[in-house]
Every structure is written in C-alpha cells, then in structure tokens.
Image: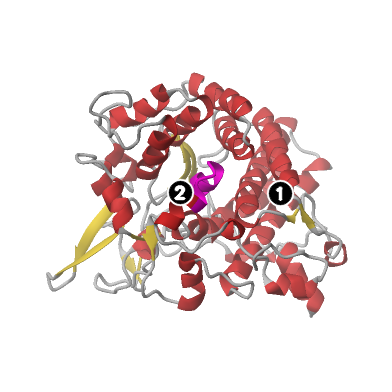
Amino acid sequence: MKKLILLLSIVSLTVGSWGCKESFLTLAPASNPNAENFYKTKADFDLAATAAYNTLYTVYHPQGAVSYAGELMADNATIYNISGNQADKWQFRDYTLAPANTLVYQFWQDFYRSLYNINIVLDKLEGATLDADYKTKLQGEMLFLRGLYYYNMVQIWGDVPLVIKPITAAESYNVLRSPAAEIKAQVIKDLTEAKGKLAAAPSLVGRATKGAAQTLLGKAYLMTGDKTNAAKELKEVYDSKQYELLPAYTSLWDPKVKNTKESIFEIQFLGGSAIHPFSVYHREFFPNSNALGFYGSGMNQAVDDIWNEFETGDSRKFASIDTGFVDAKGVFTPARFPKKWMDKSAPLINQDIAANNNFMVLRYADLLLLLTEATGEVSYLNEVRKRANLPLYGATSYPAKYNTVALALEHERRVELAFEFQRWFDLKRTGRAVEVLKTKGKNITDNKLVLPVPNIVRDQNNKITQNQGY
C-alpha cells in the first residue's frame, strides 16, 4: 500500500485516466491503452498530447494550486463560507498552512500526475518512427508544458523532486528534493529547447508556440534575477509584432472572443454542453450562493484593498470586479467577486453553468509589463496605461504615490492582471511579498513563502526533507 501511495505522489504508470478526461482541444475517443503497445502511430501521439494538455484543466483550475497560491495567499482575494474542507482552505488565506493540509497533498499529486503525462510523451517520442517536423513540434510543446509546471512548482514549494522521465515506484524512492536553483535551471533549459522547436503559429488552436515559450522563458529569467537574458527573450517576442493589445480591455473577457492577438497562451474551453470541457471559472468565482440556479463556490472574492487600488476612471475596475447579483426574485445582493470569466448567456445544465470562457495563462499586456521590469523602460508600461486611458508614467497627473518605476510597475501589474493568478508570484519575484503582505494583515514570514511538503509524502519516504517553518 505504501508503494501505491508513493506512486500516486510522484508518478503514474498507467494511461487509463485518458478515457475519463474530456479532451483539451478535440474530443478524442475514450481509450485505455497499454503503454507497451501504444505510442506507435501519429494518432497515438495525438491522443497522448491531448492527455498532456488536459492537465492544464487541473493545474489552472480556479480551485487548483496556481489559484490558491497566486491569489488567495496574496492581497487581492479572500474566501468566506465555501464548499468543501473550509479549514484547509482558510489555511492558505491565513498563512496557517500545516503539512497535513489535504489540499497541499492534492496539489502535489496533481503536478506529478501531470508531469507523468508529459514525460511519457517525451520519452516515447525518442524512438518513434514519425515525421521529423511533427516530432520536433510535439517535443517543443511538451517541454513548454513541463517548463510551465516546474516554473509554478518551484515557486510554490521551493525544492521539489525533479522528475524528467518516467520512473518506476521503486525508482521513485531515490528521487529526493532537488535544490530550487536546479529546478529553475531545468525550467530555463526546457523552455530554451522548446523555443527552438516551436513555430510562431500553433500546430493546433491552443497549442504552445515559440512566442509562448519565449515569454515564459523571459519570466523564468526574471525569477532568477537575470534581467539581461529576460529582456533579450521578451524583446524578441515584442519585435516579432505577432501580438498586440486589443483596443478595449473589456473585449478580452467576452466569452465569445478567444485566441486574439493579445493572447500568447490560452487554455481552451467549449461551453454550452455537458459533454464539452466547459469553463468553471464563472461558477467557482461566483459568491457561495445558488441564487441564479447554480451553486457558486465563493473562491477569490475581491477585498477592499484591490477595489481601492484602481485609480479613479480606470475602466478595468468594473471589467474585473462585479458588485453584486440579482436573484430570480429581483433582489439585489451586494458582493464583490471576479467578473472576467462571467458568461451570463451560458445554459444551466444539471444545476451547473456551462460557461464558454477561455483562460489566458500568458498575454501581451503581461509581456509589456515584464519588459519594463527587465529593462526599466517605462514606455512598455505606458502602452498598457494608454489603453486604459490613464495618465502615463512621467506625466504630472500620474499618481504621486507610485513615484518609482518599481512601485508603478507593481501597481500596474496588480490592476491589469487582477485575479489572473499572478499577484503572489509577482510579489515573490520582486522580493516584496513579506513587506507588502504584512501591512495587509497577513501572518507571513520568509519561511511561509513556500508551502509545506505534504506529510504523506514524507511518511512514504523519510529521506524527503521538510521546508523550514513547518
């Protein structure tokens, strides 16, 4: 039994889960293949790639690891009464996380199960007899996904086991935590290789591209403090002219508008039917109420601090935060909650709302602000402010309290990217997390800038160390 639990913590040696997951891009047929007899044809690898992309639904779920860390542990959002294990969820909000927290263990499993789907494709591609261009692009896509996941994991836990190939349960006992510096180096290696294998246009809608790999690579370099290389990668994407800001910020959040010129990497959803992978962000971010015929989960409710961060006249405020809802009886209930992924036209199916919104992991406004971070040049930041019709940095009417480029950038990223799972990672990257969050009443210390390693993982293998402070 011990080996089985460990297996689920770090690796998964079956691909039977494909049959119960909805397809990421196309509705692939149910399949339960044997790994030894699979991975022969392009169709096999297409299905395997779909399974790998499907893991984005778990990692970027509104109740997934990136959401809990990126928003709930920062200062944009909170939770009140919420479905499920409230005590474990409040621990993220209150910085009282314990190694026995069930969600921390779930997130650990989610990442390593996802990595297995990616690693098995990369492993089997090596010996596959397939078209060379197809193999190269698919390798690039899988390397991008692995880089993305380890980029998040190293910020969430620090040192983690580095698994870059399929391993057996017995082998997993010898895979201990690698230093964070090694994880970051692997992220940069994967993304560097990925950008060299990927094309400017996606192989299919929603697949990773060279621009996505370079944007994330730039972000990874910033995570390591290497602004020179970050600027180089980000500037190449900027100069490619492949992406641009949409004229209106509000149009980014129309559920019918997808994969625009502003989108660099976007998770695909198909609303309107129970058999499609419909978007759950609307439901999860709606207040904990069934007033509209479905039960909202109450995740990431907007706090006064983010509401007040928006400048007077900033239209992004009301595009990002709703102020309440009207129930079937016409009664208005005031509440502040994320609005970006609302789909009011979506049908109700089995007391759930089958929303159509995609989720942008990387977008051009993010890249522009990263360029200012890497170079110190405010012209990129001002492109974002110009779209919002706000005074440009350097103008006399610009808010005086953001009187340095660093503070101006911190403010701009917060309001532009509100509720997009960025805030906590931004504060950590710039070394401002403890200072900023303490002033907001968060019980944060340097040791709490990473999550604990789950107790179950350490029970399975006593060679696995724990983060300090837990």
Tell me the residue that label 2 is attached to: 423
Cα separation, mark 2 vs mark 1, equals 21 Å
Is residue 113 a member of the stretch shown in magenta?
A: no
Q: Residue at x 63, y 75 (%)?
A: 100
Q: The N terminus lies in which quarter of the figure?
A: bottom right
Q: Which quarter of the rendered picture does the C terminus lie within?
A: bottom right
Instruction: Using the image as rendered, state which of residue 257 and residue 323 is in the foreground.
Output: 323
**Near-viewer residue (335 or 203):** 335
Query: Does residue 90 appear to the left or right of 411 in the view shown?
Result: right
Estimate the x, y position of residue 461 in percent, counting from the top left.
81, 70
Point out which mark residue 278 bears.
none
Residue 379 appears left or right of 343: right
Quadrant housing residue 451: bottom right
Establish if 277 lies above or below 255: below
Establish if 217 lies above or below 310.
above
Q: State whether residue 262 appears in this view.
A: yes
Q: Mark 1 and mark 2 in contact (Cβ < 8 Å)? A: no
Q: Earlier in the sequence, mark 2 or mark 1?
A: 1
Span highlighted in magenta in the image: 421-434
Q: How many marks?
A: 2
Given the image, on which type of amino acid does mark 1 rest? Ala
The image shows residue 46 at horizontal and vertical percentages of 65, 47
Residue designated by label 1: 180
Tell me, yes or no, if residue 247 can be seen here: no
**What residue is rendered at 50% in x and 44% in y?**
426
In the image, 133 versus 415, the foreground residue is 415
Q: Secondary structure at mark 1?
A: helix
